[in-house]
Amino acid sequence: MGVWSTNFQKLLTPMPDLMSLASAEAHIIIGLRVAVMSQKAYRDARPFLRERLGSDLAVSRFLVLVETIGGAWPESVKIGRACCPHTMPDEILLLNMLRHAAVGNRPGFDALTCEMIGDSARERIYMDMESFAAVYGKRTAGKR
């Protein structure tokens, strides 16, 4: 099987369903969706996010992260509707970025986004993800 067919197979692979993700990761995707929709509707997402993310500090860091991503992404971040169980490629990319930032894997993080996001914006996203993960990780340690 050549490189072309391997890449084609990846394109045909469906995105994971929210129910197949660890609950901590599903909460992040749902939180992202709610934060974006709340901003568009001029609503405060904090009460909902506090339930999902566990603390006011985690919510604050998450909202800063969402704002940073929105400003750095080369086009609109594609997210699913809050009620949709399917994930979007941008949501999975953000989860993968967060996974790398949470364990301090900067080379892995950079490899995911170096061609689409500039150095300074990528640095800011990494730092915000690391900051959020430090707080959120304490709440979710050991949970699936």
Image: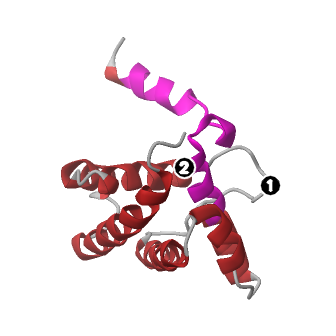
Position of residue 50 measured from the top left corner of the image (x, y, whole percent):
63, 71
Q: Amino acid at mark 2?
A: Glu
Label drawn at residue 83: 1
Q: Quadrant of residue 5?
A: top left
Q: Position of residue 135 (x, y in %)?
A: 41, 66
Q: Is residue 88 left or right of residue 84?
A: left
78 w.r.t. 23: above or below: below
Report whether 101 appears left or right of 49. left
Report the Cα–Cα distance between label 2 and label 1.
16 Å
- SS for dot 2: helix
- Is 22 drawn above or below residue 131 in the view shown? above
Quadrant location of the N terminus? top left
Judged from the image, the secondary structure of the residue bearing numbered disc 1 is loop
Label number found at residue 25: 2
Residue 35, can we see it? yes
**In the foreground, 28 or 82:** 28
The residue positioned 52% from the left and 43% from the top of the image is 143
Counting labels gives 2
Query: Residue placed at 66% from the left, 43% from the top?
Result: 18
Where is the C terminus found, in terms of image quarters?
Answer: top right
**Residue appearing at x 46%, y 56% in the figure:** 94
Q: Main secondary structure of the magenta part?
A: helix
Asked if residue 120 lies left or right of residue 138, the reply is left
Residue 15 visible, this angle? no
Q: In front: 31, or 125?
A: 31
The residue sitting at the top extreme is 1
User: Looking at the picture, which amino acid does disc 1 mark?
Assistant: Cys
Is 19 in the magenta?
Answer: yes
Residues packed near mark 2 inside 10 Å, few (<14), some (14 to 19) or many (20 plus)? many
Residue 8: x, y in percent?
47, 27
* Magenta span of residues: 4-31
